[in-house]
Amino acid sequence: MEASDGSSKIPFGLNVCRLGLHPLLALVAGACLLVLVGWTGEVTAWQHRWTVLIGVVYALERGWSFWKPRTKGKWRHKPAFRAVLPVVVFGVSAALLSEAGRQSLGGHLFVQAAVLVSGLALVISHQTRFTNRAFHPGLVLIASFLFLVLSGALLLKMPLCTVPGYTCSWLDAFFTSTSAVCVTGLSVQNTALFFTTTGQVVILLLIQIGGLGIMTLTFFAAVVLFEGLSLHDRLLLGKMIQENRLARIGETLKFIVLMTLVCEGVGALVLFLNMEAIPQIPTRLYHAVFHSVSAFCNAGFSTLPDGLASGVVRGNWIWQVVIMALIVIGGLGALVNEDLSFWTVAKIKRRFKKEGPHRRLRVHTRLVLVTTSALILLGAAAILASEFHFWKGPENGGRVLTAFFHSVTARTAGFNTVSMSQIGPLTAQVLMLLMVIGGSPGGTAGGLRTTVAAVALAHLWRQLRMGPRGMVFFNRSISAETGSKALGLVFLTGIWLACNFVILEILQSGSGVSETALLFELISAFGTVGLSLDLTPTLAPAAKTLLIVNMFVGRIGLLTVMATLIKPDTRPASGKPKEEIILT
């Protein structure tokens, strides 16, 4: 049937079928997958019938979509898997009809997962319809993380996610999900002893998606699988990943995802090769992958009962060094890592091939590297003195290694190689200072950020000297507005922590917990660190809820949350006469 303009006109019923059947099949497949993985654990009769039906209908629907004259030509420009996947799904679905296939757990999982992934790909291909709406970037970021937290809590409530005999309450599910999505690491339950492998895999997925960001992954899939990004998508994503060069948004996005996968893969390989205490290859590989992802995303979750203080890795300095390296790389930020990689490649070309332009590291990169190095060295020196000279604290792999490890992990990673309840009071103060500062912008770390701390101190020093010279970093001048913004963010963070600390004290009144321990937990939650003085599981439900809010705000960013919730002032300039106010 031809339309008046000469184009093919699709009947209404067929159009509805084309648009609605595929997502509906994906939704049913997802429900079957969750029931199979989280509830039954085995293939039941009704699951078998639904899986075969979903697979066959999906293959026919996709086959019709492929062979239609209207879309046949367009499919030639689509990824090959979109044409091959329906054929494979049909073949596996047919094999499930046999007597042996009825109880094939792998076959049923494959069909359900394949249909679900195909449906998600369809949704991603239409993501522009959502992002083209005039949403505030901060609102999109908040909504995406809130969606992840809610989804994670629902998944962790599945019976097969917890060890038999234990039940995960709604509060514990939300707390664990928020901690994983916000890559914090605070736990109300021991991850290794309370959650099954299924529950731990759910936590691992939440850590990975939360570390990268669901919108980042969505846009990455749109770039790789489909036509790319619209101008509005580039503007929206640029504000999220803090990339102002719109022409490089797609390349930066690919770099973020690929760098993450490469670093986590290399880290997992090294950890795997240096875990001789566990002879079983699958178990060793599982622990290596989990810790590599958790370290790079600065999450701090561990599948070992006592974390890195457990006997199978205790004293293993290679594990500690690799974990530290992953934490630092993940905490530097994607833009810093990208700038460093381009600078290194340019240096190599100029050295060996005597060609290529001279590339200069950006001021942001230099400031992040210098501040990060200073915090690691000064933090390690302070911990070494406070913990081993003024206090007989525990060590793991030597005093120097223990001091350096906790100097690194305190800035939003959350791993511990010793029992945190045995550290000295002065060391707790040092760790709190490091936790407040946190990592760098654009990375998986939280806290104030290294650049905010450095610029705020420089701006304050400039104000005290009262000289005409402005802030200068690495032969580049920095505007006073940036300094005022950094100093204001420090002040705003102080107010936020002070108010929440007062509320936390009220909620925990009469519990006998020291103020230092409460403040430590609060800062750890807000900085998305995850270190705990073994206090989190004992907190009152209302106090845990307050920590959930702080983890969420700390991951999104206090300034982003405030800028999203507070309506901007669009009023014109007042034009009123100026008058000075005496401050000193």
Image: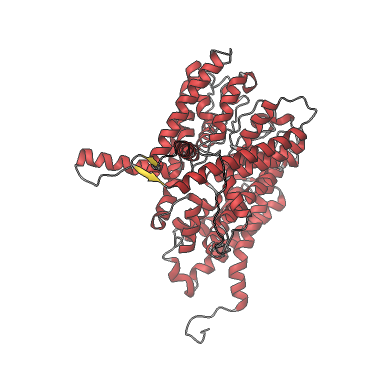
- Residue that protrudes farthest toward the left in the picture: 354
Residue at 62% x, 72% y is 16
| In the depicted structure, whether residue 472 falls above or below residue 376 | below
Nearer to us in this view, 500 or 2: 500
Residue 375 is left or right of residue 312, and the answer is left
Residue at point 59%, 68% (across, down): 19
Give residue 11's position: percent from left, percent from top. Answer: 59, 79
Give the image quarter of residue 370: top left
Q: Looking at this view, is 141 or 566 the one in front? A: 566
Residue located 30% across and 42% down the image: 345
Judged left or right of residue 356, residue 537 is right
Q: Position of residue 130 (x, y in %)?
A: 57, 63
For the C terminus, the image quarter is: top right
Using the image, determine if residue 77 lies above or below residue 192.
below
Nearer to me, 162 or 577: 577
- Give me the residue at 57% from left, 66% from top: 61
